[in-house]
Every structure is written in structure tokens, then in C-alpha cells.
Image (tube, rainbow, N blue to C red):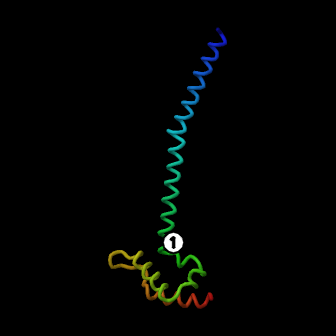
């Protein structure tokens, strides 16, 4: 009789432990993992946007690989990205000519 009561008590305790572990996993752990994944995805999407705008300036290899037409497009896109209304921080044609000179120097 005592053994049966102990077995029942053990089964009930294990059931509660399992339920609490599952609840902890579903309610907290998976939520934290989802938030971490979302945060990383968001960060990599931001890096992709930065790469599209500034990527041609990040390495000399990339700069050397661009022909004049693509370099001019990148310079124009950079000017558009940094423009506010009619005010621009850079001039795409000036940047283009300076980067062409730099590209020749680093070849």
C-alpha cells in the first residue's frame, strides 16, 4: 500500500515537472529564441540596405571591379540616399571623378 502511494506521488510529481518544463519551454524559451531570430533578421536586412548604398566604398577590390557605368550608378544612388529635399551632402559627378582617380591609383 505504501509503495503504491509512493508510486502515485512520484507519477504526479513527474507529471507536474514535465508540465512545468513544457510550459517554461513554450512560454519563455521559444519566445526568446523567436525574438533573437527576428532581431538578427532585422539586423542583416539593415546590413543589406547599407551594402546596397555604400558597398562599393567598402573595399578596393569592389571599387576596382566596377566599370565606369556601374560606378556612376553607385555614385548617383549614394547621392540620392544622402539627399534631403534639394540639399545634398555630395555631388555624384564629383565623387565619380574622384573615385575613378582612386581606382587607377589602387590598381
Residue 9 vs residue 45, the one in the foreground: 9
Horizontal side of 96 relative to 15 (left or right) equals: left
Q: How many marks?
A: 1
- The image shows residue 78, relative to residue 1, as above or below, that is below
- The image shows residue 39, relative to residue 99, as above or below, that is above
User: Which residue is depicted at the point 50% across and 89% down?
Assistant: 68
User: Which residue is depicted at the point 63% across and 13% down?
Assistant: 4
Q: Residue furthest left?
A: 85
Q: Where does label 1 land, which residue?
A: 51
Which quadrant of the figure contains the N terminus? top right
User: Which residue is depicted at the point 45% across and 83% down?
Assistant: 73
User: x and y percent of residue 95 in the render?
Assistant: 48, 85
User: x and y percent of residue 66 in the render?
Assistant: 54, 85
Residue 26 vs residue 73, the one in the foreground: 26
Secondary structure found at label 1: helix
- The image shows residue 28, relative to residue 87, as above or below, that is above
User: x and y percent of residue 59 in the render?
Assistant: 59, 78
User: Which residue is depicted at the point 61% across and 90% down?
Assistant: 105
Residues packed near mark 1 inside 10 Å, few (<14), some (14 to 19) or many (20 plus): few
User: x and y percent of residue 6 in the render?
Assistant: 64, 15
- The image shows residue 98, relative to residue 44, as above or below, that is below
Q: Residue furthest right?
A: 3
Which quadrant of the figure contains the C terminus? bottom right
Amino acid at each position: 500500500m505504501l509503495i503504491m502511494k509512493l508510486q502515485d506521488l512520484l507519477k504526479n510529481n513527474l507529471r507536474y515537472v514535465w508540465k512545468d518544463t513544457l510550459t517554461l519551454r513554450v512560454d519563455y524559451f521559444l519566445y526568446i529564441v523567436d525574438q533573437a531570430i527576428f532581431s538578427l533578421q532585422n539586423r542583416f536586412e539593415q546590413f543589406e540596405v547599407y551594402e546596397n548604398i555604400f558597398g562599393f566604398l567598402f573595399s578596393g577590390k569592389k571599387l576596382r571591379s566596377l566599370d565606369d557605368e556601374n560606378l556612376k550608378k553607385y555614385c548617383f544612388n549614394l547621392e540620392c540616399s544622402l539627399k534631403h529635399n534639394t540639399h545634398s551632402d555630395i555631388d555624384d559627378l564629383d565623387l565619380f571623378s574622384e573615385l575613378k582617380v582612386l581606382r587607377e591609383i589602387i590598381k
